[in-house]
Image (spheres, rainbow, N blue to C red):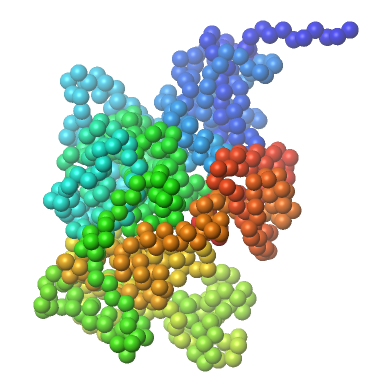
Amino acid sequence: MDEPLPIDTGTSAIGQVPVASEDPVAHVLIDHPVPHLARTFDYAVPEKFADTARPGVRVRVKFAGKLRDGFLLERVEKSEHIGPLATIERITSPVVVLTPELLRLATATARRYAGTLSDVLRLAIPPRHARAEKAVLKAEKAAQQQQSDSAAPTAGEAANSTSEGSASTSNTPTSTTTDTIGRLGEWVVNESAHDREDKFPAAEHPRIAMTCVPGPTPGLSWITAGLEAARATLAAGESVLWLVPDHRELAVLAAALDSSEDIGSYSVLSADQSPEQRWKAWLRGLLGHTRVTIGTRAAAFAPVEGLGLIICFDDSNSNYLDQHAPYPHAREVCLLRSTIDSTGLLFVSTDRSAEIQRLVEVGWLHDATPTGPERREGAPRVYVPDEERDPFAWQRIPSRAWQLMRGALRPGTKDTNAVGPVLVQVPRAGYYPVFACARCQEVARCPQCSATLTTQSEVGPFACRSCGFHSDTFSCGRCRSNQVRSIVRGRGRTVEELRKAMPGIEILESGGDDIPVAIDDSPRIVVATTGAEPYVLGGYACAILLDSLWPGPWMRSTDEGVSRRLRAAVLVRSRTAGGVVYLGDTDETIRNTVTTFDPVTTMSRALNDRMELGFPPYRRIVELTGAGADIDAMITAVPELTELIRDSDDDGQKAVAAYPIAAGDTVGEALAHLIASRSAKKLPQVRVRIDDPRSL
């Protein structure tokens, strides 16, 4: 005789806990690091939480015998689970932090990068800070009570907001540094007000790509362009989200916003903030207390009420690539967000990334780069070594470079506009970061792992950064000579040479952990490694870009070389103000791009070759790291993948496969499913990284 089917008696909870009368079942996303467990589970909503258990709030639930955090995604009437359900133990906060907009963006990001929703939300929503939350909610309640008396924040509230944001953008700034940054911000705002032409298009939610030249604000034209776009967006009653790559740009941008009377209060989101500051700023954006939010990488997910424009500066910067699973790039998050929420986009930079140029060429982005005459007028004059006319052009610092430096540093020069700080950019730090045998010219390599050796002086000690090898003496593996010569001099050796050649001139080093954000316009020499160039009030009078900059043997090495050189050259005054650049690179692509200040044409030509070869950005790539058999299983299970290269080392193998852009969501979901399936079966995991710029 067949057993009777179970009778549905409604939702019940373990322990006979009374449940909510309406929608008593909650779909809760468990915040779990294990892929196959980072999904939704059904829980009963106790009657006491009937009003506070709203979709989007943080909750605490019991999972596998332990209390875990989670997000309440949805409440429904019934569960497919047969039997009593475990209950929600606690509502962590009454604030709905996972809004429908953020949930859609996080879901799309997880699908794009083959990750879990929990991993993305861990990056998107900062940890809760109870004291900060109470302060913001108290201010929110007070504002609601006084809404009839005041429709906008008072000047005191705005000043308090901006001062909190600005203070959080640097680690421990001195009063002198803070004053210089403030003056820099005022200078940018004043100059932009003088030359303001309201070029930002009036079209609803425009999508624009722009490269900038020094112009009247060397190094800070991106702020001028962004302020113009922000003002137009705010005037239309919408809000602005502005991303920058690191804390230095954040400090300068905050100073400019402080000086802009028509921008108002703003929130700052940065990894340098304390948990309290970060959570307070995040909630202020969520509750609509500010209409402008600025921040670094993670701010791409920041909640902004009535978002109308996303500004992203220097999208090719490596700081935008998150090093936590699922390894999203802030540029791609901005693109997803603009598509989902129908917002405007402004990508402004000194160079042009391959991804942005492809979107320009397919018509998805409009190119607003200055024309040829504007670029030539706003850019500095660029000199390159001339081996035929200058017999000393082979020297590391040729006579022409010395002449330009002395002309900018000596107050007695005829052209007073050319007097000011001099930037000397070197590719690497240290003394002799790369050296060779003085007898046979063989590059010095580690006897243990064959990586290049480094040294702090001509007599040692010698060390390997890859395996930790250390020796007080050097012996060439080819001819056994003990003498060395420099191939690339580092920052330390360059400073030593400049001090000998120019006694009495102040020399400032910038690099490593000691990178000034901004300095004044006093004549001095600033020796900086690439990416560590300080901003200067009024711009540099001269820049000497030493050595040949080649970042490494990978597909985007020339792109990065162009980006680093332009990042330094754009800090120099325009040619009409006497600005000059001496470029030591021998690479023709870098020379042509910096000389013409036209990265758009350079990237357009490079894309033609990559399109024919089927390389990114015309196809997406995925990097798989693990055991060879496991990688084979993953590639075989996803038919859209085509393996390109594979390398082996002691830790396993790394394979790079490509797939069509149109199959992006399909491949992402398939890879995420495979990862979860292997996790459930306790099989060895394969690390998946999609569109990592360093994969090829």
Image-quadrant location for residue 318: bottom left
Closest to the observer, 598 or 361: 361
Image-quadrant location for residue 45: top right
In the picture, measured across the screen, residue 6 lies left or right of residue 644, that is: right
Q: Is residue 57 above or below residue 682?
A: above
Work out whether residue 10 can be spotted: yes
Image-quadrant location for residue 542: bottom left
- Residue 679, position in %: x, y? 68, 41
In the picture, measured across the screen, residue 548 lies left or right of residue 409, that is: right
- Residue 260, position in %: x, y? 18, 44
Work out whether residue 426 can be spotted: no
Closest to the observer, 21 or 352: 352
Q: Is residue 603 above or below residue 348?
A: below
- Residue 612, position in %: x, y? 54, 58
Kindly identify the residue that appears in the image at 60 percent across and 39 percent down. 666
In the picture, measured across the screen, residue 594 lies left or right of residue 298, that is: left
Q: Is residue 351 above or below residue 128?
A: below
In the picture, measured across the screen, residue 169 lies left or right of residue 418, that is: right
